[in-house]
Amino acid sequence: VCAQLAAVCRDADGPGPASSVELRIDPLVLALVGLALAREQDDVARRHLQRLQQWLLQKQQRFPEDPLVHGSWRGRAALGQPSAAATSAAALVLAMHERLLPVLP
């Protein structure tokens, strides 16, 4: 799971192109992987959870002019539209361990 997660989050270290803003992972899988990593107490799991959280923050939509989209996440099924499932899963993962809040300035 960690190797696949690293492949999904490979662009977490730098900004990705605009076309890669959608989450390329099923929201249910995202939430389950986040929960599994949060339950583990070792440093490897904690690093993977932090990388996943960084990736999610990078993929958060930033459109202050559109309050219905700003701060949300979108999945592949809803290109150009915020996805309630993707946004809920991302917010859940961000709230784990580090207690990060998906709030934009």
Image (cartoon, helix red, strand yellow):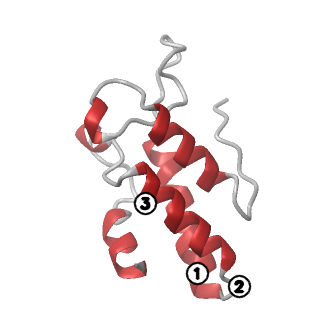
Please identify, in this view, whether the residue under mark 3 or under mark 2 is nearer the observer: 3
**Left or right: 68 as drawn, with respect to 83:** right
User: Which element is circle 1 on?
Assistant: helix
Height in image: 55 above or below 8?
A: above
The C terminus - image quarter? top right
Residue 98, how many percent across, how many down?
74, 61
Q: Which residue is mark 3?
A: 29
Q: Residues within 10 Å of mark 2 (few under 14, many from 20)?
A: few
Query: Can residue 60 be seen at all in this image of the molecule?
Result: no
Height in image: 59 above or below 41?
A: above
Residue 54, how many percent across, how many down?
53, 57
Q: Mark 3 vs mark 2: which is more N-terminal?
A: 3
Q: Which mark is residue 89?
A: none
The N terminus - image quarter? bottom left
Q: Which residue is mark 1?
A: 45
Q: Which residue is mark 2?
A: 41
Q: Mark 3 vs mark 1: which is more N-terminal?
A: 3
User: What residue is rendered at 53% in x and 74% in y?
Assistant: 48
